[in-house]
Image: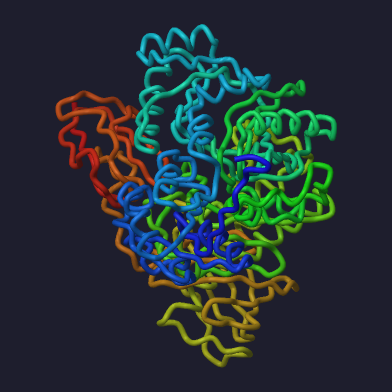
Amino acid sequence: MRNGSVQSRPFFKVLIANRGEIALRVMRSARKLGLGVVAVYSDADRDAMHVRQADQAVRIGEALPAQSYLNIPAIMAAAKASGADAVHPGYGFLAENEAFAQACKDAGLVFIGPSPQAIESMGNKAGAKEIMKKAGVPCVPGYQGADQGDEIMLTEARKIGFPVMIKAVAGGGGRGMRLVTDAAAFPDALRSARSEAKAAFGDPTVILERAIQNPRHIEIQVFGDSHGNAIHLGERDCSVQRRHQKLIEEAPSPAVTPELRARMGEVAVAAVKALRYEGAGTLEFLLDPSGDFYFMEMNTRLQVEHPVTEAVTGLDLVELQLRVARGEPLPLKQQDVRFAGHAIEVRLCSEDAAQDFMPQSGRMAHWEVPDGIRVEHALQSGTEIPPFYDSMIAKVISHGATREEARGRLIVGLEQLVALGVTTNQAFLMSCLRHPGFARGEATTAFIGAHRDELLAPSGNAAFDIALAGLLLYVTNPQAPPWRRGRSLAATFPLPGKMELAGHVHELEVTRERDGSYSVITDGRQDRFEIDQLDSGAIRFRNDGVMDSAKFLRDGDGLYLQHRGVPLAITDLTFAAPKAAASNGGDGKVRAAMNGRVVAVLVKPGDRVTAGQPVLTLEAMKMEHVHKAGIDGVIAAIDVAEGEQVTTGKIVAEIGAA
């Protein structure tokens, strides 16, 4: 309804159909407006923070998303059981599902988001591009045809010209997306994209687009209301990505001039008005080096990176969503929007950047966030990170008067954040922020690919950190003499040891000197430490006249150490037996590299394979990972079935000699 016929839609209790930090973020704004909040949870999230902080919480199913957070009937039943009269979908799972929005409407619930019709119009990439073309929005050339035959797709890809992008028609978040550089690689990439799209969205349909070389990924935040008003809140630059998923976002973009911002904003607002769109939305564009921009897609929801827009505008975007959903007009016009300073957000993910960003699950043994910087999370020490959901576990956001100030604050914040027990991309994010190319504002979507070796290189403190790890292994060993400050009367003798760090074994020798200091020799290098304070999880020490500190966690033969923001996982091998066999497939056994679900078995017993040939695909944390043969040979056994959930290290296939 519009203008004089607009009706208010009051609600008093909001069910949040999401989990983790997303649910907590929505709760915060809902409570600010005096609303009650209801959480939903899967079996994997029974004791999660978002469950404990809600007014009510309702179980909706087992761990896998399809059985819980994607289960529309279960969520509708939860709303009824809790007495909720509105549903906020968060910004994942069902946030862009028109069937879910319609189910809410049919149940008499206010859906805090756009209409089912708007979601449907923009949710299909092919249809969205046609709508945008009619509205005069520039679009990337490509193929959106209904004929999805393999030969037709390859023919169309050749017409477009390589490199091309394959994109899931119902997709988002980088899933079901592949960059293909030549015709030979196209069939495998098409199969993989379809498989991932089917698993993530229930629809294997894809479109093809010309790959714009070295673009920036620019998105425009928009809002519309039921009174016909529409505004934009400026742009975000989301160019730093891995696997087509964003890692760093900032506002404003270093590449967008006020004139370009006005032009892109005008296009975005025109599209919102043409759609009669209500609520928060984001139009995503590729900006090429010449300054031309092309529409990619519209996300009919709030984005993960919305905090940077909040920081530079001073607005609470979730509050705006709630007010618009109640039938209120937007509280400001375009001329009222003001931008102040610069904001940058990084996504902290439980993944191993050095292993192709492999997702990691497990127990976050120690978690500590710094003061003075915004951290969106749902973690505490001891939290279990399950393998079933997205690998993003927190967002760290800084705001400063200038871009350089915001960048510096974010680096310091990451140095002070402590995440021990599960491998994260914390050190990689700091490398990105410190890189001269990023510092100059030059990062495009090619940034990580172009600078990967530099970004993954060990820090300048690597040798010192090895020595510090050796010291901590010594002083935290239950069999070692307890640390006491001051001189020692005991006889001094060196204690040899061995440890593994990042796949490398280091010999070490630690000596407690009579003056109370420690001498640590690792790989032929000697460091001397004086310990000022040693607590259960922190050490303060002096080295070469400099006092410093580090956080650590000792867990049996394992040691987690964080020094100057770089987390390390060390294994004490001093008394360990030799490893029985290599785990990289060199023994003919293919092992699961992570906890995950088998989505495709690509070979069968008796097939001849060569080293490097794909044999099986696992899905973990919404991403597919191909497992390959480690040797030439013949498949002797397949030890898993499609759909099976496997744990890290499980043998999934065995290869015998040819």
Q: Quick one: quadrant of the N terminus?
A: top right
Q: Quadrant of residue 30?
A: bottom right
Foreground pick, 300 / 501 = 300
Residue located at (28% from left, 33% from top): 600
Tell me where residue 360 appears, x and y as whole percent. Answer: 42, 52
Q: Residue furthest front?
A: 4
**Percent x, y of residue 539:** 60, 77
The residue lying toward the viewer, choosing from 631 and 236, is: 236
Q: x%, y% of residue 334?
A: 79, 42
Query: Is 245 rendered above or below residue 208?
Result: below
Looking at the rendering, in which quadrant would you find the C terminus?
top left
Q: Quadrant of residue 183?
A: top left
Q: Can residue 562 be seen at all in this image of the molecule?
A: no
What's the residue at 39%, 65% (across, down)? 82
Percent coordinates x, y for residue 446 in the rendering: 63, 31
Q: Is residue 508 left or right of residue 313?
A: left
Would you say residue 57 is visible in this rendering?
Answer: yes
* Applied colour scheme: rainbow
134 lies above or below 46? above
**Depth check, front residue: 490 or 383:** 383
* Location of residue 26 by image quarter: bottom right
Vertical placement of residue 509 versus 199, above or below? below
Q: Number of callouts in the render?
A: 0
- Residue furthest to the bottom in view is 489
